[in-house]
Amino acid sequence: MSRKIGVLTGGGDCPGLNAVLRAIVKTAVGRYGWEIIGFRDGYRGLVLNDYLKLKRSNVSGILVRGGTILGSSNRDNPFHFKVEENGEVKYVDMSDQVINNIAELGIECMVIIGGDGTLASARDFAKKGMKVIGVPKTIDNDLYATDTTFGFMTAVNTATDAIDKLHTTAESHHRIMILEVMGRYAGWIALESGIAGGADVILIPEIPFQIKKVAQKINDRKNAGKSFSIIVVAEGAKPLGGEMVVKKTVADSPDPIRLGGIGNYVAEQLSCLTCLETRVTVLGHVQRGGSPSPFDRILATRYGVAAVELIREEKYGMMVSLQGDRITAVTIEEAVHKLKNVPVDGELVRVAKSIGIEFGD
């Protein structure tokens, strides 16, 4: 039976989005003969009815490409959509227009690829009767109810490569080198890249740090003949009793807070407490870019195929999920009801502490 399916990529871009789109199109079109409609720039395309028909020719060669051929947006919430009328900016609920748009196109189900914000809107559309399937995407790995989101391991690889490069200049110049990485309110990127890169200190949002304990670690290394140190700090890390450092706020964004600057704060404190020269590298959006790692290409492909199979089985309102080594499905509600933070007593933190990595607690 021929079906017409819609798909969009929402929120911040990350490596592996194109791999998911490729898997969806190759499975739905190539195996089942369905029609796939891709909406441009996330939910904005749904609101404005801006779309294209995706064929196998559209997804040829995109497995290795970063970003998304459909474009994305993290500011266009259809339930709170920015419009301008008579020179005045206001926000309007456009969700009914979205439902009308897909009904007129004859779309049976929407595959929504995104993180917590994008999937929260997918959940809200499901409550209004839209048939939706979710695919978990974020470099932060903070989506609940899945072990891993695609894009995360590529970001970890990028951060680890940066740590490897910082090691050589840190040792040559006898400096403290601080790498500030993304992750929002979760410390997964900092934790895993810090362990993989041999960091001496890892600072994450889940474990508020005491700067004097960090300085003590640095001084102990200096007294032991180690005249350099590597610190990986998540953008959401904060001192004990203090607050996260906010770089700026974006008023028209569903998530207006932009974190950034904790690396410089730590550097200023440690320069005084250790008398060592300190440098900060903010990795920034490099973590979102580039070709996806083999792990993420495979995971994204598995997710894309699983999303099509859920549609075939008419299991709507679900998100594909990695549990151990198995792809399964959970409700979208379960996936977005809270963030997945690093467990402070979990194995990875215990392993890091066992090999001498300092968290400042």
Image (cartoon, helix red, strand yellow):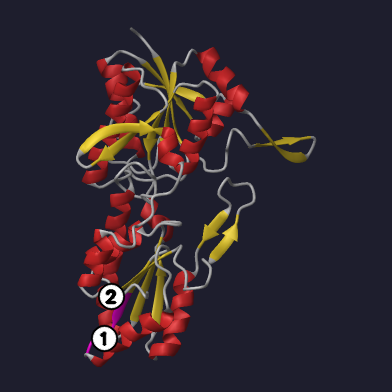
Q: Is residue 57 above or below residue 214?
A: above
Regarding mark 1 in the picture, which secondary structure is present there?
helix
Q: In the rendered structure, which segment of residues is drawn in magenta?
A: 225-230
Residue ranking furthest to the right: 86
**Most foreground residue, 217 or 174:** 217
Rendering coords of residue 314 (x, y %): 36, 17
Residue 164 image-quadrant placement: bottom left
Quarter of the N terminus within the rendering: top left
Q: Residues within 10 Å of mark 2 (few under 14, many from 20)?
A: many
Determine the residue positioned at 63% across, 47% down.
Answer: 252
Mark 1 is surrounded, within 10 Å at the Cα level, by few (under 14), some (14 to 19) or many (20 or more) other residues, namely: some
Residue under label 2: 200
**Extreme residue in the top direction:** 1
Q: CA distance from mark 1 to mark 2?
A: 9 Å
Q: Of the numbered discs in the image, which one, if any, rests on residue 130?
A: none
The count of marks equals 2
Q: Amino acid at mark 2?
A: Asp
Disc 1 to disc 2: CB gap under 8 Å? yes
For residue 293: magenta? no
Looking at the picture, which amino acid does disc 1 mark?
Arg
Does 8 sit above or below residue 144?
above
Q: Which mark is residue 221?
A: 1
For the residue pair 302 and 212, the one nearer the viewer reads as 212
Q: Residue furthest front?
A: 345
Residue 349 lies in what quarter of the image? bottom left
Q: Can I make out residue 70 in this image? A: no
At horizontal 32% and vertical 88% (from top left) the residue drawn is 219
Locate residue 132, reporting x and y percent.
44, 25
User: Does residue 19 appear in this view?
Assistant: yes
